[in-house]
Image: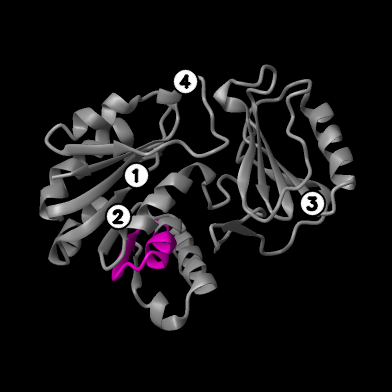
Amino acid sequence: MDRLPTIDDLGKECRRLLHGRGEYFPGLEHVAIDWFSPVLLVTFYAEKENNTPILDRLIKAAKDCSEITAIVVQERHLPKAPKRTVYGEAPESPLAHEEGLNYRIALDRNQNHGFFLDMKPGRDWVRGHASGKRVLNLFSYTCSLSVAAIAGGAKEVINLDMASRALATGRRNHQLNFDPATCSRASYLAHDLFKSWGKLKRRAPYDIIIIDPPSNQGRSFYAEKDYAKILRRLPDLTGSDSLILACLNAPHLDVSFLTSLFADYKLKTRLPRASGFEDLRPQAALKCLIFRP
């Protein structure tokens, strides 16, 4: 309990305030606390005796902090990972603010809220390398990496994801940040990647390819089986100067899983972990590696 973050001077930028799953905070391994101004999001990954005292302490602190208008709790250990507001009132359309860009989040929806804080180094890298480039964003979800690419001057971004609802949010994320002419640089394909190689190949090569799949998503993607399928198709999508951002958030698979898959590619760098996501088991954290042919 003494390791809970101090709630003051939060500012506008979204960030993780406590990453219990990194195992640096004894007794809080099941807790994550995120800041999406003006909402504090508390995620419990297990039912523990200290859950209620944690909330009581945060609510008490929030009453003395004008920056916080609501505390929302998500209980990931329960079926469908429900959310509930335990303090104040959350805005209807809350936004994540990061490096001058805005992203819509869904605090009223179960499971994922649509924006992953630990991917900030990936967004920063894409923004810094996208100028004048054609970008293919696979498993694009709500398109935060596409927004970063467009902000960095990308010539074109093709976003592919099976979830049309997520892509609709992605389109709105672009509209939040750019004028219509700039938004037109991004396109959206609500397709199954493994049935869309022909369409993607016809538009190849791409200067940057982003591969950020779920580690395990039912029948649609299973990392140990399906990541290799993408690798077999990459030569049809890349040129000699292409850059590949390969990501994986699977605690049971370390970085060697990716480096083995990309054995025929040159590893340029591994991106640093996001601030606030310190982990005693760094190999279990999100992995983002840059490769080239």
- Where in the figure is residue 86, as x and y percent of width and height? 82, 44
Which residue was labeled with disc 1?
220
Task: Give the vertical position of 232 relative to 203 (above or below).
Answer: above
The reply to whether the magenta stretch includes residue 46 is no
What's the residue at 60%, 58% (across, down)? 97
Q: Nearer the viewer, residue 185 or 219?
A: 185
Q: Specify which label sits upstream in the sequence, 4 or 2.
A: 2
Q: Secondary structure at mark 1?
A: loop
How many residues crowd mark 3 within 10 Å: few (<14), some (14–19), many (20+)? many
Q: Quadrant of the N terminus?
A: top right
Task: Give the vertical position of 173 relative to 108 (above or below).
Answer: below
Which residue was labeled with disc 4?
281
Q: Quadrant of the C terminus?
A: top left
Q: On the picture, is 255 further left or further right than 274?
A: left
Whether residue 161 is visible to the viewer of this picture, yes or no, is no
Rendered image: mark on residue 68 = 3
Which of labels 4 and 2 is toward the front? 4
